[in-house]
C-alpha cells in the first residue's frame, strides 16, 4: 500500500498521478459493492443503492415499465399511477377520456374539469344564464341564486324590494333582521331611531348604542355618580370601584390597618 506521507517527498506530477489512481480505486470499489442492479435502473447519484429509470416503477426488486395510456404523460411521483391525463382529459378506468366543455364555460386550471363563465351557473352538464332582477347584482357563489340585492333592498319572491329606512338609520347588507340599523348615538325604538340621552360624566361606548360612565364614576339608574374613595384607597382597574392601598385591607367601606 502507498503511504500518504511519502507523497510529500516525491515530485508534484507524481503526487497528482498517485492521488488520481487512489481516487479511481475508491470509485471502482464503491461500484463493485453494487452487484445486483436490475435492468432499467441506475445507481443513485447520492446515497446508496439504485433507482428505476424514468418511466419505470420499482416492484419486487425489479423495475417494471409503467403502462402509459393514450393522451397521458409520465410523472415523477412514486405513488399513484405514475402518470396523469393531458389537459381536457379525465381518468376513467385507467384510461384518459376527452370531455366536452359546454357553451359559456372554460377549462379549469387543473385541466380535468370546467367552470361556468361569469353570469352563468352550472346546472347538470350545462351553464345557464343567471337572471339578475332590477336592483340586484351578481355574486361569486356555488350555491344560492347567484345574485344578491343591492344595499337598501331585500329579496322577496325572486325580486328586490326597497327597504323603508327611518331617519337617522343606514341600510345594512345582512339577509336577516330589518335591513337597517341606527347610526351611532341613536337607538332603535318602535321602528324609529331615537337619540340616546347621555348623562353628565358619561360617553358613548364603542358600538355607539349605549353609554358608560367616565372613570371615577359609577352608573346609578340613568345617571353617573362619583365614586367616593375612603382614606388610603384608590380607583381599581375598572374605574367604577376602589381598592385599598397596600398594606391596608378592605373593611366594609374603609381601609383598615393590616
Image: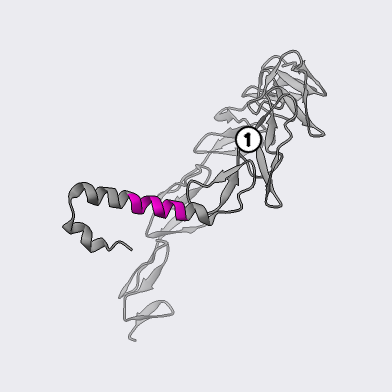
Q: Would you say 83 lies left or right of 45 here?
A: right
Q: Position of residue 136 (x, y in %)?
A: 67, 19
Q: Would you say 232 lies left or right of 121 here?
A: left
Q: In the rendered view, would you say 100 is above or below 237?
A: above
Q: Is residue 19 visible?
A: yes
Q: Residues in magenta? A: 21-29
The one of 61 and 231 positioned closer to us in this rendering: 61
Task: Look at mark 1 in the image and give the residue it sits on.
Answer: 75
Q: Position of residue 52 (x, y in %)?
A: 61, 43
Query: What residue is at 82 percent from the left and 34 percent from the top?
Result: 93
The one of 108 and 175 positioned closer to us in this rendering: 108
Q: In the rendered view, would you say 254 is above or below 84?
A: below
Within the image, what quadrant is residue 80 found in?
Answer: top right
Q: Position of residue 110 (x, y in %)?
A: 65, 29
Q: Is residue 223 visible?
A: no
Q: Would you say 187 lies left or right of 177 here?
A: left
The one of 161 and 12 positioned closer to us in this rendering: 12
Query: What residue is at 61 percent from the left and 28 percent from the top?
Result: 166
- Is residue 209 highlighted in magenta? no
Q: Position of residue 104 (x, y in %)?
A: 72, 14
Element type where label 1 sits in the image: loop
Amino acid at each position: 500500500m502507498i503511504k500518504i506521507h511519502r507523497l510529500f517527498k516525491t515530485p508534484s506530477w507524481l503526487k497528482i498521478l498517485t492521488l488520481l489512481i487512489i481516487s479511481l480505486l475508491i470509485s471502482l470499489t464503491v461500484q463493485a459493492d453494487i452487484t445486483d442492479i436490475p435492468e432499467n435502473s441506475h445507481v443513485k447519484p447520492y446515497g446508496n443503492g439504485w433507482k428505476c429509470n424514468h418511466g419505470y416503477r420499482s416492484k419486487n426488486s425489479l423495475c417494471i415499465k409503467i403502462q402509459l395510456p393514450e393522451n397521458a404523460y409520465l410523472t415523477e411521483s412514486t405513488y399513484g399511477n405514475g402518470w396523469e391525463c393531458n389537459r381536457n382529459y379525465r381518468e376513467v378506468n385507467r384510461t384518459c377520456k376527452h370531455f366536452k366543455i359546454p357553451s359559456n364555460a372554460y377549462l379549469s386550471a387543473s385541466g380535468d374539469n370546467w367552470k361556468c363563465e361569469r353570469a352563468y351557473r352550472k346546472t347538470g352538464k350545462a351553464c345557464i344564464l343567471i337572471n339578475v332582477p332590477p336592483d340586484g347584482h351578481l355574486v361569486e357563489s356555488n350555491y344560492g341564486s347567484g345574485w344578491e340585492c343591492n344595499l337598501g333592498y331585500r329579496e322577496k319572491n325572486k325580486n328586490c324590494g326597497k327597504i323603508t329606512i327611518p331617519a337617522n338609520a343606514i341600510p345594512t347588507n345582512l339577509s336577516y333582521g330589518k335591513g337597517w340599523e341606527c347610526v351611532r348615538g341613536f337607538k332603535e325604538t318602535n321602528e324609529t331611531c331615537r337619540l340616546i340621552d347621555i348623562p353628565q360624566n358619561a360617553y358613548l361606548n364603542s358600538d355607539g348604542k349605549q353609554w358608560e360612565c367616565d372613570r371615577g364614576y359609577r352608573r346609578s339608574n340613568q345617571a353617573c355618580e362619583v365614586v367616593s374613595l375612603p382614606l388610603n384607597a384608590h380607583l381599581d382597574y375598572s374605574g367604577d370601584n376602589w381598592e385599598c392601598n397596600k398594606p391596608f385591607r378592605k373593611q366594609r367601606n374603609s381601609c383598615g390597618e393590616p
